[in-house]
Image (cartoon, rainbow, N blue to C red):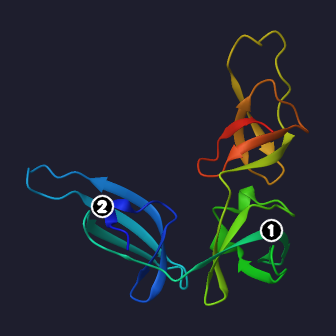
Amino acid sequence: MPKASELKKGMIVDIDGDPHIVRQLEAKSPSSRGAATLYKIRFYNLRTQQKRDESLKGEDLLSEADCVRVDVQYSYVDDDIHYFMNMEDYSQYGLNSDRIEEQLPYLVEQQEGIIALLVDGELVAIEMPQSVNLEITETPPPITGSSATNRSKTAKLSTGLEIQVPEYLAPGELVKVNTATGKFMSRA
């Protein structure tokens, strides 16, 4: 049972019998000496997608949700449903686009390393790997003679995501993107 002070973004806890994922976390230090640090946490109910804001003390205990983590591969999208395949038994799970809105810019067909969160055998959320490799589809040409400067430019990637990349990169190159920050990490 984690304490409120041990929570991290992406953790899943049980609140009133429903699994909730931690989306935002903010620690507020008190001004008086004897007061406890308060943690302002925004949870999302994985079943109903409703948000819930809580203010908890660091010592408050929360119970972990009964959730199974399974390795999956992103297979394809059909209408508004994205399908993932279990890498062990090849079973399929579908998830609506609005449930994974934040992860969509990082999903590419046949992508592995994704963790599916199952509650009672039903897919409720996915966890992306820390970084993904995406191809640059559009970017302005590099300016010649500017190799000594550390300038960046906007690049559009194969998923439609736009990020800042170093000026020397060209269309067709693979780049590693951090899925938590959405920022360029390196060439892939």
Nearest the viewer among 102 and 109 is 109
* Position in image of residue 12 (x %, y %): 49, 73
The residue beneath circle 2 is 39
Q: Residue at x 48, y 60 (%)?
A: 9
Give the spatial CA distance, label 1 vs label 2.
35 Å
Looking at the rendering, which quadrant does residue 75 occupy? bottom right
**Residue occupying image coordinates x 37% and y 65%:** 41
Where residue 50 sits in the image (x, y, percent)?
48, 79
Residue 174's x, y, as percent?
Answer: 84, 40
Q: Are marks 1 and 2 in contact (CB under 8 Å)?
A: no
Instruction: Give the residue type at disc 1.
Output: Gln
In this view, 136 is above or below 118: above
How packed is label 2: few (under 14 Cα within 10 Å), some, or many (20 or more)? many
On-image quarter of the C terminus: top right
What residue did someone put label 1 on? 73
Mark 1 vs mark 2: in front:
1
Nearer to the camera, 111 or 143 = 111
123 left or right of 144 in image = left
Instruction: Give left or right: position of 147 versus 43.
Output: right
